[in-house]
Image: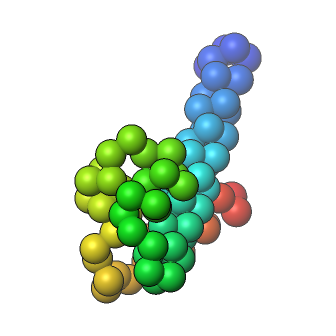
Amino acid sequence: MTKTEDDRANRRTRHAAIRAEVAAEAAENATTLDEAGLSARHIADQLGHSRPSMTQDVYLGRKAGSGGAADALERAIDN
């Protein structure tokens, strides 16, 4: 692998970690707002979504889950 290819691969890895961190933060924010009783429209506005249905499909509605995904994201970010 050339230095340029290696640099690109490193950038892609860093960008993937950043995207995972941003997604985890958005999910945490959506959950907090949902638990506080805000409407899907208000949560969508806060997250910058034009459609509340997208916010509901992605972030809301599932009241049960496991910590496995959150743990995996934390490990990926820490590495």
Seen in the picture, residue 52 relative to 69 is either above or below; the reply is above
Residue at the (32%, 83%) spot, across then down? 63
Q: Measured from the top left, where is residue 40 in percent x and y?
A: 36, 63
State the quadrant of the C terminus: bottom right
- Which is nearer the eye, 76 or 56? 56
State the quadrant of the N terminus: top right
Seen in the picture, residue 29 relative to 26 is either above or below; the reply is below
Q: Measured from the top left, where is residue 32 in percent x and y?
A: 53, 76
- Which is nearer the eye, 59 or 14? 59
Q: Looking at the image, what colour scheme do you see?
A: rainbow
Looking at the image, residue 15 sits to the left or right of residue 31; the answer is: right
- Which is nearer the eye, 15 or 24? 24
Residue at the (29%, 76%) spot, across then down? 62
Residue at the (63%, 46%) spot, across then down? 18
Q: Measured from the top left, where is residue 6 in percent x and y?
A: 67, 24
Quarter residue 12 falls in: top right
| Numbered disc total | 0
Q: Is residue 76 visible?
A: no
Q: Measured from the top left, where is residue 48 in percent x and y?
A: 50, 45
Quarter residue 50 falls in: top left
Q: Is residue 7 visible?
A: yes
Seen in the picture, residue 15 relative to 6 is either above or below; the reply is below
Residue at the (39%, 68%) spot, across then down? 39
Looking at the image, residue 7 sits to the left or right of residue 74; the answer is: right
